Every structure is written in structure tokens, then in C-alpha cells.
Image (tube, rainbow, N blue to C red):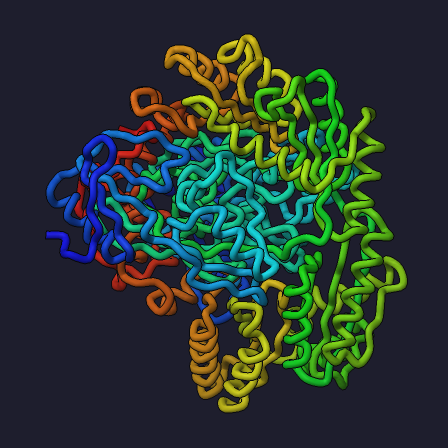
Amino acid sequence: MTALTQVLSAIEPIVGSRWIRRGRAELETYSSDGLPTLHARPGAAVLPGSRDEVIRIVRALAQYHVPFVARGAGTGLSGGALAQADALLIILTRLTRILQIDPRNRRATVEPGVVNVRLSNAAAPFGLHYAPDPSSQTACTLGGNVAENAGGPHCVKYGVTTNHILALEVVLPDGDVVQLGSPGGDPWGPDLVGLFVGSEGMLGIATRITVRLTPLPTAVRTLLADFNTLRAAGEAVSAIIAAGVVPAALEMMDRNCVGVVESSIYAAGYPTDAAAVLLVELDGMEDDAVADVARAVAALLADHGARTIRTASDEADRQRLWQGRKKAFGALGRLSPDLVVQDAVVPRSTLPDVLDRIAAIGDRYGLTVSNVFHAGDGNLHPNITFDRSDPDQRHRVERASVEIMEACIAAGGTITGEHGVGRDKLRYMPALFDANTLGAMRAVRRVFDPEERCNPGKVIPIHACREWTTAKRTIT
Amino acid sequence: MLGSAVRVDATADGIPRATPRHEEECALLLHHANAEGWTVAVQGSGAWAAPRPAALVIATTGLDGLSDVSPADLVATVRAGTTWRRLQQELGDHGMWLAIDPPGSDRTVGSVTATGTAGPLRSGFGQVREHILGLTIVTGDGKVVRTGGRVVKNVAGYDLAKLVTGSFGAFGIVTELHLRLRTVPRADQTLVGRGVRDELLDAALAIAEGGVPPAALELLSPGATGGDGWRLAVRLLGTDGDVEAGRNDVCRRAGIALADTSAMESAALWRGAAARAVDGQVTVRLGGLPEGLAATLDLVAHHLDDTVEDWMSATVPAGTVRWTGDARIEDLNLLRRLAAEREIPLTVERAPWETLERLGHFGAYREGVGRLVRGLCDVFDPGAVLRAPVGAT
């Protein structure tokens, strides 16, 4: 009997057999996340119904030394929630309670399975929202957002997940439960909340999450500008940032992307002959002040060669402009059987050069690269559409992806801004971090998880780590 | 042994002091200290932390200067021994600034990072950690670890910069940082209200309940302003339109009179309050909720400052209170315990070594957390060379 089989017998009385999945067919559902290129079928999956069940499951796993992976909605884009055949997948989508909304202190406490947008909807009657808004916000869970330190279009102004997490309850891999952070967000010691957010599920499972809520802006202006060249659009982005404007969102889409969106059911009225369009949103509490900034931004856009600048006339028009952006990935997905959504960040001033380089790489490999991304953060999403059943295409996509990452690193950038390293980007980590730094990360992980059972095989390329001597033991 | 490159002298207490000029020299020094079993104290400009006993002092003042400022990216790379004043001056030459106004004056960037001490601007711009994109540390045994980067969004690898920021040097000596900048706002206006403490606090809470918090919304004790009563200071930053709109909103909500100040008056107010934050040997921070501020202030007054003469400052939207004065260890200990019962962490930001050694910067760990902190100290300081008093010994 394998350790996994043994632990499943221990777990069955905790959750009941109807919440355990063991069959090949039913496990196939969980064999990939939002990234189509990686697959792994977990040994089994369990869907606990409460925090207490999660704790008891993790304790049973510790007893039998079985690896495990926590999973939310499975919308991740780095293969971060994949589990191997020897591991148990713990699916947290039944933990959906919003435990508290405290409008006076602008905070809320939720369970990890709460879907991102549901919290914002629940906070809206108080004039508040949860600011980080990944494109998948109607599906992704806050537990997953914490694990990945998720971003979104409005993070250029409001910050990413880590800037909004005040406290966490975490089940450590040995089954101990710890409270990190305090109700107001000040730490009790070194900032373990900051360490946990973005650790991609390798330090434990967050069972309660306390977040900061942000006032909903009462004044908004949304502008759409289009350009003859990607370079001009990139320069306009740099000019807006350097002028000290803090846009609520600053998004770019290139010609390929616009063409796909406009020929889909999500058509937003973007000009299809433009090389690039910029979507700029400005918000605040006073309409006059926001209108002033919008005028200044429009002038900057015009100075940098915008052909037309359109301002959303009303909320319906604004939603239409945003729909094209938010549904771009969906529209791209319809274009060809498979889609690789890449994610990298470069210094904003290098955007024009890097976009040129990415276009050249796409041309060289005969691939269609569509860019739709958070330009205000320098956070690129070069997307490659392809057909996985063609080995030659697969190979070219692979090569082009590597070269795109290399180009971003060479520009002083990083390999992921919001999708995480997961399994997909393990190979790039040594290009970004030296053996000491990778060794430190691994040693930190082993403080929380000495057996390395919690989401094994992600983020840290173990072969590239320096051996790390700690006070009490040697980690090899 | 250390080579002729490293400048070595002695402190006033007669402890040998090395002043490395490069990160490699710093690494070499710590490597040797670890091998020899020396304890090391880290010293910046000496304007904040009290001296502590050690076999060797490493001064970071030789690790100074801005390595890179990129106005187009709003990012700067700065060495940790750079003074705050120099940093802001040089950034100002580029029309940039770092939106942190730490307590104290003439401190180094490394000191502000190690202690995580944000000032009144925390209301509008968050904690110190929010401004740090990446950093380099040299661990207690001399390994160089580089985390984060020069981009404003980055999820590659664990966020060790968050762990290091505010850890009081437990995990190594910070040598260099990548910082998130902002452009210098065109308008900068401070409004001041005077009155009794709780009336001002109510006004502040009413302002905070409005829209976006002002850049600063600070309740200052007489000891903090050098004046004769409590003040509520509201700082508005942005375009002329932003500031005008903010002023209207703040005045409408406050329900008390708020007076405009001139640029000179407001600079003196904020700078004075920061400088007086070291008028006393001990500084503590209590992190609660905005709604609980009256109770937190009462708690501090009752246990540390009966006569309300000390330096005290509350960052209203953050719910935090900072106090500076002189206190007995027993009183601090009792206050920490009572605060912990209300789920309010008390951090000893600075104190004489005898006090720190007994109390620790932290020291009210929740169940199970102490062992994690100990484990992390073992990773980054295996020979207990730095042995920062983070309550994990």
C-alpha cells in the first residue's frame, strides 16, 4: 500500500468519500491549470469543506509524509498548482465564506476559496472594493491570489496583492496553525506575511486571509488612444509615467491583439488599422481634478503621436472599452487551438526596444505574437497562438519563449510580474538569481517545510542552489 | 587579515570598527567574524540606534551613494549607508522623491530599512516595505543574497526583501536597495487643527472615513510639535487640483477648524516632529486599528507617560501610535503584554542595549511563530554573529 493510499484511508473519515477524487477521468480535470503546455495528474484530490478539515488533512499528510499541493480555481498560468502522482491535491473551492467586512477599519477577512470579484461586490455597498483585479477575477480565488501575489490592470496605481494583505492564518506543512500579521497589518516580528504572499503555496496553506479594502473612486475617465507604431505607444507610456501621472490603469494592445478582439464577440470598437492602442484610466474622488489629469494625459498622448484619442462617454461606453481588454485572452484563445500567455516585466523606459525585439523574435520563428499587457508597470504579456498537435510549431514556440525571456532579462527585467514561476519558469530562475540567493530561498522554504512536501518541484531549481549551512543542520 | 582595503578604527567604547567600501569587503568581514566567532554590531550614522556591545563594529557609512537614478522608470538604486537627506536631495535634483518620512534625522537608508520605520506619510504611501523593489544583503556568515529587482512588479522567487525590511538586522547587513520613486508633487499643503486630543482624533477619523486618505493624517502630542497642545496635521500632495479638492473634502468632514500653513511652517512642523522622535531613549510603535486609537493612546499614556509630556504621534488611517521617552523595562513589558491582549503588536524601535536585550524588538510571538523566526535566524545568521534581538534567541 502506498503512502498516498494509506493517507486517503485516514482522510476519508474527515471529509467523507464524496469529496475525494481518485479516478483517472475525474482527476484529468485537475491535470492542468490555465497554462496548456504542462500536465500532471495528481495521485488523488480532496475537497475539504472547512478550515478544520484542511488542518486535519494536512496533519494526516504529515503523519504519512505525503506531498501535497493546494489549489484554488486552477486559473494560474505557470503550472503552479499541478501535482504529481505521489501527491494529494487539496482543492479549496468549498471554503467560500466571507467571514467579516469591517468598513470602518477598511478590512475584510475571508476564506481562501472566495472568488476575487465576490469580495469586491460584497464591499461595494460600503463604498469599498478589493483593489487587485487579475483578468481572471471572476473565477480566481483569493487563496490563489495570495499564493501567486496576483496583479491586475489597476495595480499600477493600487498595488499588487502583497500591498493589500494584512494578516493570514496558515496551516504549516507539519499541521501546526500559525497566525501571521495583526488586524491592523503591523507585524509581530519579521514580516512573515510579506514572505508568505507570493511564495506559490510552498510554505503552507492560508486558511484565513485578512485584506485591506480600498475606497471606490467616485470619478473616472477612460481614454483610448491609437498609434501608428508600437514604439510611439511605448514612448507615450514612458512620458505619462515620467510626468508623474499615476493612472489607475495603463494598458496596451498591439495590432494582432486588436484584430482578434475586434473580430470576436467582444468587439470594443478599437481601430483595427492601428499598430497599438493604449487604454488609460484615471480615477479619484473629485470629478474636476480627474478631468484635469485626463486633459493633461490626452495632451501627452497627442504629443507622442496618438492618431485619435477617445474618451469614454459614459459608464456603458467605458465598460465596452474595458471588455475588449479583459476578454482579449479569451478572444486569442479562439484564434487557434493553443495559446501561451507569457509574463515578464521590463523597466518602463525600455518598453519600445523590448517590443521591437519581441516582434523580431516572433518573425524569426514564423509565429504570431500578440501583445496585451500592463504597460504602466512594464508588465508584458506576449502571447503566442499555436497548434500543440504540430511538433514543429511546439518547438518553435518553445524556442521563441526562451528568447523572449532572455530579451526581458537582458533589458534589466524579470521573468514574471504576476503569473509566478511555478513549474513553467523554473528554468529561467538561474538566469535571474545566483546560487546563493536560490540557496537562501530553499533554506527559507525548509524552515517552514523541512521535508519539502508542500507544492514540491516549484519556483526553486534545486540543482542550481548553493548548499546552505544553517546553525542546526546542513541542507544539501 | 582583512586586507589593507578596509578602513579600521575604533568606536568611542574602544571597539574595533571596520568601514567597508564595497559589498565584497562587507562579506569578507562577516565571513571572518563568523569563522572567528566574533559578534558584530552594525552602525549607520549613529543617529537612531544606541550602541551595543560587540567584538567588531561594521559601519555602513562607506557604502554610500546613489548607484543609479532612472527618472523614466521611477526607480533608483542606492547604497545602504547613504543618508536620508542626501538621498532625497539627489532624487530631488531629478524631480523625484521617495515617499517616506522616517522619524529621526540624519539617518541612513539602511537604518530606515532595517527598522521599517515609516513616518506620517504611511497614511498615503504605506509602509517602508511598499517602497522597496529589491535589495542586497550580506548574511551573518558573509554570503551575498540579492532579491527582487529594478522593476516595479516582480513575483520571481520568494519576496525576501519583505522579510528583511523591518527585521532589525536579524538576517544580514543590507548593502544596496532598489527603490520605487515618485515625481515631486506640484502642490504640497499642510492643514493644522488644534484642540483637545479626542476631539482632534474624532476629526481625523471622520476625515479617514472619507475617500482616499491624505498623504499624512497625523495626531501629534505637544512633545512632538514642541507646542502647547495636541495638533492634527493633514498633508495633501498632488496637482493643484488634487490638493484643492482634498482640502475641500478634509475641511468638510473634519467638523473642526483647520488652518493653512505656509511652506516654511509645514516643513518646520514635519521636520521638527521627526527630529524630536529621538528626544528620549526609547521609541516604541503600537499597531492597532483606527477605531481603537483612543484606547491605544490611553494605554500608552497610562503606562509610559502620565503627564503627557513625551513625544507621541498617531498615524490615524494606519491605526498606529509611536511614542518616544524614557521608560522602565517592567513598564514596557507590561504595556506589551496588555497591548498583545488587544491584538496590538508593540515593537521596540529603539532602546538602550540593556533594555533591548531583555525585551527584544519584538517579543509577543503568537503560538508557533517563534520557532519560524528562530529557524530563519539560523538560516541567515548561523553563527549568531549579528544576533539581533528579535526575540528568537
Give the answer, above or below, for where B209 lies relative to A144. above
Left or right of residue B334, residue B33 in this image = left
Q: In the figure, residue B260 lies in which quadrant?
A: top right
The image position of residue B72, as x and y in percent, is: 58, 67
Question: Which residue is drawn at the image coordinates 47% and 68% (left, top)?
Answer: A413
Question: Which residue is drawn at the image coordinates 52% and 57% (left, top)?
Answer: B90
Question: Which residue is drawn at the image coordinates 61% and 16% (left, top)?
Answer: B295
Foreground pick, A356 / B177: B177
Foreground pick, A10 / B278: B278
The image position of residue B5, as x and y in percent, is: 19, 57
Give the answer, above or below, for where B38 lies relative to A320. above
Camera sees residue A97: no
Foreground pick, A465 / A17: A465
Q: In the figure, residue B384 lies in which quadrant?
A: top left
Left or right of residue B357, residue B141 in this image = left
The image position of residue A397, as x and y in percent, is: 48, 81
